[in-house]
Amino acid sequence: MTRLETSAAIGDRFFDLQVNGYAGVDFNGDEFSSAELHAACEAMRGDGVERFLATIITDDLAIMAGRLQRVVAATASDELAGKMVAGIHVEGPFISREPGYVGAHPAAEARPATLDAAKRLLDAASGMVKLVTLAPEQDADGRITAWLVSQGVVVSAGHCNPSLDQLERSIDAGLSMFTHLGNGCPLQMHRHDNIVQRALGLADRLWLCFIADGVHVPFVALRNYLRLVGPERAIVVSDAMSAAGKGPGRYMLAGQEVVVDEQLATWAADRSHLVGSACTLRQMSNNLQTELSISAPEVARMTHANPLAALSLASSG
């Protein structure tokens, strides 16, 4: 039996914490419908995804609220979506607006965390928000982080550049995860004192998420990160957008045009930065085994067991 056949035998079942869209469907689209969600769920199910968090990214608060409401309504009206959508991941808007750290998010809409804004987003999602990504420096006293945790929401750092002290204060307030480490930061940073090193230094207190497509983080770096973090605290996410499962072409994410090349790199129209991923979690699982020689049980832990544990959810079977 080959390594990949072993993977399928052990558990070709994935839980994805970060899905912006799939198979031509953009969850952040303003015409998003239950039929589109059903089609995306069918495609994900075919690629081994058991459950996932639909991800809504930074925008004007009213626009984000409308998108959250559409995900809630689409999930409630479709049986398959009701089984597969485990909740919503709100990525932003409480993130850094600094170039590089803001990534593909609209910098003009990035903002400090406030209780009113957080309540507005959670109310719009009718209890479906399970995960919020924010920048610790946008919640300097940790008050919003602590409130979100009190509401049963997991809080993750991402698109951020907090000092080590700021990051530790956020952890003390309840932050427990780091979103797609190695991304959402500038291409060039201080060679030693940077956010990647700070997060890795706190790996014993955080779930650390990685995009394992070989594009967002080169495999040589990902191998080093995973050796340090270990399968006990690592989570692999797809960060999939509408191009996932489709191949090269032009796609949309929240009104932005994304160009997908032959290597499945997801470029902004001006080629200045990556925007989401076109790689499926099944492809990433295969990458971990073939490119990094990680065992099938450890891959299953990072793509299924750990995401469930991070959200304190039980397996569906």
Image (tube, rainbow, N blue to C red):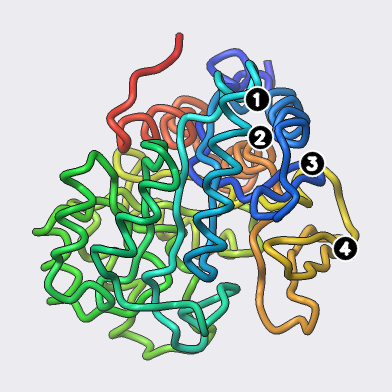
Q: Are marks 4 and 3 in contact (CB under 8 Å)?
A: no
Q: State which quadrant residue 36 falls in.
A: top right
Q: CA distance from mark 4 to mark 3?
A: 12 Å
Residue placed under numbered mark 1 in the picture: 48
Circle nearer the N terminus (1, 2): 1
Query: Residue 23 bears which disc, if any?
Result: 3
Q: State which quadrant residue 259 falls in.
A: bottom right
Query: Residue 153 bears which disc, if any?
Result: none
Q: Residue at x 29, y 46 (%)?
A: 154
Residue placed under numbered mark 2 in the picture: 282
Look at the image and tell me in which quarter the N terminus lies.
top right
Q: Residue at x 32, y 35 (%)?
A: 311
Q: Are marks 2 and 4 in contact (CB under 8 Å)?
A: no
Q: Amino acid at mark 3?
A: Ala
- Give the number of the mark in front: 2 or 4: 4
Query: Residue 250 bears which disc, if any?
Result: 4
Dot 3, how many residues are within 10 Å of its Cα: few (below 14), some (14-19), or many (20+)?
many
Circle nearer the N terminus (4, 1): 1
Q: Does residue 11 appear to the left or right of 120 in the view shown?
A: right
Q: CA distance from mark 1 to mark 2?
A: 7 Å
- In the figure, 307 relative to 212: above or below? above
Q: Nearer the viewer, residue 67 or 200?
A: 67
Q: CA distance from mark 4 to mark 1?
A: 25 Å
User: Helix or strand or loop: what does disc 3 sit on?
Assistant: loop
- Give the number of the mark in front: 1 or 3: 3
